[in-house]
Amino acid sequence: MDLNFSPEHRAFRADVRRFLADSLPDDIRARTLRGEKLSKADHIRWQRILAARGWLGHCWSKAYGGTGWGPIERFIWDEEVHLNGAPRANIPAIDLLGPLIIHYGTEAQKQRFLPRILTSEDWWCQGFSEPGAGSDLAALKMRAVRAGDHYVVNGTKLWTSYAHDANWIFCLVRTSLEQKKQAGISYLLIDMAQPGVTVSPIITVGGVHAVNQVTIEDVRVPAENLLGPEGDAWAMTQYLLSYERIVGAGLGASTRYLVEARAFAERTLRGGVPLARIPRTAQKLASLEADLMALKFTAYRVLADEVAGKAEASIVSVVKLRGAQLQQSITEFMMEEGGPLSIPDVQTLPEGGPVIPEADAYHAQQAMDRRKLTIYGGSAEIQKNIIARRILRI
């Protein structure tokens, strides 16, 4: 197994770095590195730069306007985006829905939806979690009942990221009660600009409005907006793992946080001595660096297996679990070692969002924000169960 990147892939990484250095707007880079939540206008500005370069559809085939990149290029792109302070594009549309439509959609759906994603005319959110159905998606209750050439949809989605900015939502809905729970779930593409769709904001503990509750009441959805076969959403969701095996590791984010943590420990004095020179703190940093190295080589092994066509889908649980835990550990380290320096500025902007302070005083905000990593996209407990059953065979 070769864990080294080829000369071609090293050249590709250099090309990505040049592009990000030359094309990423300075204000977007600075605010991303400070942990700010960017506006929709900021994201669209960056997406249009990516689209002009032909790099917006980084996990799409060339036939539909994507890059046609393989798993190594996608891995390098994701890592460099995090390292260089570039925001992720509209993740539900680019990373999730786009590949699903390309693989499972009708030709009419491809022609209707994909171009409008690349032009940023449509902004999508993802309707998976519900009250009582978070990591256990098989417990979802949103119903879609066929009525002629439409489905009538009723139910509630929860923790829906950036639904307040979206005009479309792709939902997991229950289309059958007659089969086992997993077999009665389907994908529906729902226009949010119609009566019966209500978006209610949820302000998180950090004072940020990023997630929402979406209530759908007696909304009629054309049957042509069914994505893939009815009742086959469970298998379709497993297909998405082929695009997310390594991304969940968050290597770029962890590497950037650790660089910040090391720099913070070098410049911050305690008793006239830099934190990084205090044995207890130095030991913590060394442990975090060892954990990052272990995660990186695990991810490289999975990547090598994926390129060879023999990757085990369940391994995504390992890299997601350890990647999430590592980001939490690094940001907690910065908050704990920072002490008073970690207290965020409590001023608020006119629209109610918090001022994200400069330099060191955002560690608490970052530490709070990273708590979600072991919950969303499959909680840590779910990942451990998958590892135990499918890998350890317990």
Image (spheres, rainbow, N blue to C red):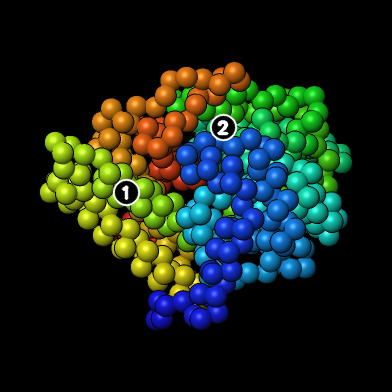
Residue at which label 1 appears? 263
Residue at which label 2 appears? 210
- 319 and 378: which one is in front? 319
Q: Is residue 211 left or right of residue 264?
A: right
Q: In this view, does 257 lie to the left or right of 19?
A: left
- 104 and 301: which one is in front? 301
- Residue 146, x across and y down, in percent: 78, 38
Q: Identity of the amino acid at label 1?
A: Ala
- Residue 188, x across and y down, in percent: 72, 43
For label 2, the crowd category at 10 Å Cα-Cα, with few meaning under 14, some 14 to 19 and many 20 or more, is some
For label 1, the crowd category at 10 Å Cα-Cα, with few meaning under 14, some 14 to 19 and many 20 or more, is few
In the image, is residue 58 above or below residue 278? below
Q: Is residue 244 visible?
A: no
Q: Is residue 351 left or right of residue 283?
A: right
Q: Identity of the amino acid at label 2?
A: Ala
- Residue 15, x across and y down, in percent: 59, 69
Q: Can residue 118 be seen in this view?
A: yes
- 113 and 360: which one is in front? 360
Identified at 53% across, 69% down, the residue is 13
Q: Earlier in the sequence, mark 2 or mark 1?
A: 2
- 270 and 126: which one is in front? 270
Spatial CA distance of label 2 from label 1 is 29 Å
- Residue 93, x across and y down, in percent: 68, 49
